[in-house]
Amino acid sequence: MHIPVLKKEAIRLLDVKQNENYIDATCGRGGHLTAILEENGPKGKVLGIDESLEQIKECKLKTKDFGQRAVLVQDNFANLADIVEKERFGNINGILFDLGMSSWHLEGSGRGFSFLKKEPLDMRYGQDNQLTAEKIVNYWSKVELARILKDYGEERFGERIAEEIIRTRQERPVTNTVQLVEAVKRAVPGFYKRQKTHFATKTFQALRIAVNDELGSLEKVLPQALDALVEGGRIVVISFHSLEDRRVKNFFREAAKEGKLEIITKKPVTASWEEVKENPRARSAKLRAAVKKTINN
């Protein structure tokens, strides 16, 4: 079961009010989406966006009692401005981003997000995407592989892992998660395999980010989100690793300098010990929030 991270904090910082409109740009299994719908009735609407058709279907089931107040769209949130225009979704008082994977991606999608089970090396959030992890692993150069492992995984042994992937694929294609984990295992030193964090974690993170252009999509959508909001509207972003959080923090800071945003969270909000105990995924979550300022002409 997917448990939405920092749900109470997200709803509070979105400042959800009756009859106002909101966007859940990463609606996933509908946890945050339904929480907003429970607060913004009787006439407020929520536009839910997700790349995965399976996730959208799940959201439709969970929101059926809210009728036309839930507007659901399968798409990449990087296309936010186009989606808003197409759906004629206006007067937007808040936009929520819960970045990264849901539990469903790891446990139910069968797309190779987890290094703990044997699955095809897919790692796509949306099936319209032509790039898969298998294509990256088998066709990208050593330089390109080492770059994404370093830049997207912050993997200290990225070059060694890239070299081992090249060696492995010369013998036979690397098509599943087990083959990739074994290649990483051969590449890294003994002490690295004995650490608390699994030795393949950063490799899988790097490939997932590259496949879905996660950082590029985030950089594209933040300015669109700011433009879409009414004055006084809020942006709330929950990130799960430093690469995302850094981009959100920098965007908020620059927009604040330009007088476009006021940052509400001087430091990121993190999960309580109780929430982490119930949902270990919340351990790395950081929530940042900002409000769109009134522009004085």
Image (cartoon, helix red, strand yellow):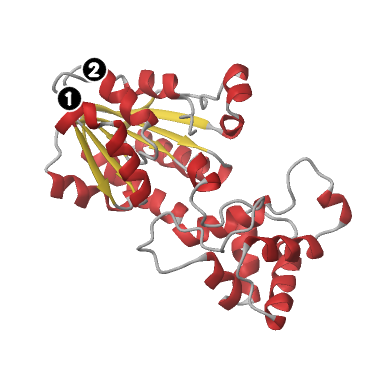
Q: Picture coordinates of residue 240 (x, y %)?
A: 54, 39
Q: Is residue 265 left or right of residue 83?
A: right
Q: Quadrant of residue 164?
A: bottom right
The local secondary structure at tag 2 comes to loop
Instruction: Name the residue: 61% across, 24% down.
Output: 276
Q: Is residue 214 left or right of residue 274?
A: left
Q: How much space separates mark 2 and mark 1, taking CA atoms? A: 8 Å
Quarter of the rendering occupied by the C terminus: top left
Vertical relation: 109 (above or below) 255: below
Instruction: Name the residue: 27% across, 19% down.
Output: 38
Q: Residues within 10 Å of mark 1 (few under 14, many from 20)?
A: many
Q: Say which of 271 and 1 sits in front.
A: 1
Q: Is residue 296 at all visible to an observer of this figure? A: no
Q: Residue furthest bottom?
A: 170
Residue designated by label 1 = 44
- Whichever of callouts 2 and 1 sits on the residue coming sooner in the sequence is 2
Q: Is residue 238 left or right of residue 279?
A: left
| Contact between labelled residues 1 and 2, with CB atoms less than 8 Å apart | yes
**In the rendered structure, which amino acid carries the disc numbered 1?**
Gly
Residue designated by label 2 = 17
Vertical relation: 118 (above or below) 183: above
Vertical relation: 166 (above or below) 243: below
Q: Say which of 109 and 144 sits in front.
A: 109
Total tally of numbered discs in the picture: 2
Instruction: Name the residue: 14% across, 45% down.
Output: 87
Q: Picture coordinates of residue 229 (x, y %)?
A: 23, 34
**In the rendered structure, which amino acid carries the disc numbered 2?**
Lys
Instruction: Name the residue: 64% across, 53% down.
Output: 117
Which mark, residue 109? Answer: none
